[in-house]
Image: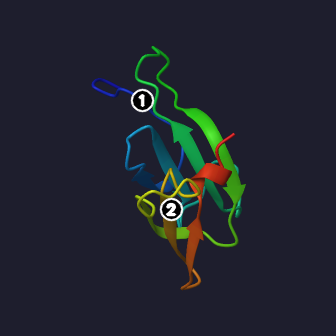
Amino acid sequence: MAGCIKMVNRSASTAFAPDGAYIATGTMAGAVDLQFSSAAHLDIFELDFLSDDRQLILAGAIQSSERFNRLSWEKGPANSEEYSLGLIAGGLVDGNIGLWNPKHLIW
């Protein structure tokens, strides 16, 4: 894949962390993976541009009740240690919106 810097094999909605150190992926609604799984996950990958490895490194994951239509990662409240990595919001296929604290998901 010419020009590709990093990659991960996912059918997913994505969102970059506000500080650019991570990328979140949420299992995409309506997509089928190679194992025909119906599972839904929110995964966080470290963006390590110093490594020559083209695969992204999984830094955290959690199962989701539903698959994702949209995903967004925004800054948390100012001066908040609890939300120092921001908040991840996901528009889920069942019409709900889920919120996750990435600080609790990253290993």
Whether residue 36 appears in this view of the structure is no
The residue that label 1 is drawn on is: 6
Judged from the image, the secondary structure of the residue bearing numbered disc 1 is loop
**In the rendered structure, which disc, 1 or 2, sits on the residue that comes first in sequence?**
1
Q: Nearer the viewer, residue 7 or 82?
A: 82
How far is the residue under mark 1 from the one under mark 2?
22 Å
Q: Residue 91 in the image: x percent, y percent?
A: 49, 75
Snapshot colouring: rainbow
The residue type indicated by label 2 comes to Ile
Q: Which residue is drawn at 40% across and 58% down?
A: 75
Which quadrant would the C terminus be assigned to in this image?
top right
Task: Indicate which label's residue lies in the foreground, 1 or 2.
Answer: 2
Q: What residue type is labelled 1?
A: Lys
Counting from the top left corner in percent of width and height, residue 98 is at 58, 74
Q: Residue extending furthest top?
A: 52
In the picture of the structure, the residue carrying the numbered disc 2 is 88
- In the image, taking residue 43 as reference, residue 48 lies left or right, namely left
Residue toward you, 102 or 65: 102
Asked whether residue 5 is in view, the answer is yes
Q: How crowded is mark 1: few (under 14 residues within 10 Å), some or many (20 or more)?
A: some
- Give the camera-side residue of 85 and 60: 85
Q: Which mark is residue 72?
A: none
User: Residue 85: percent from the left, percent from the top?
Assistant: 50, 50
SS class of the residue under badge 2?
strand
For disc 2, the neighbor class at 10 Å (few under 14, some 14 to 19, many from 20) is many
In percent of the image, x 70 and y 55: which residue is there?
62
Q: In which quarter of the image is residue 2?
A: top left
Identify the residue shown where x is 51% and y is 69%: 90
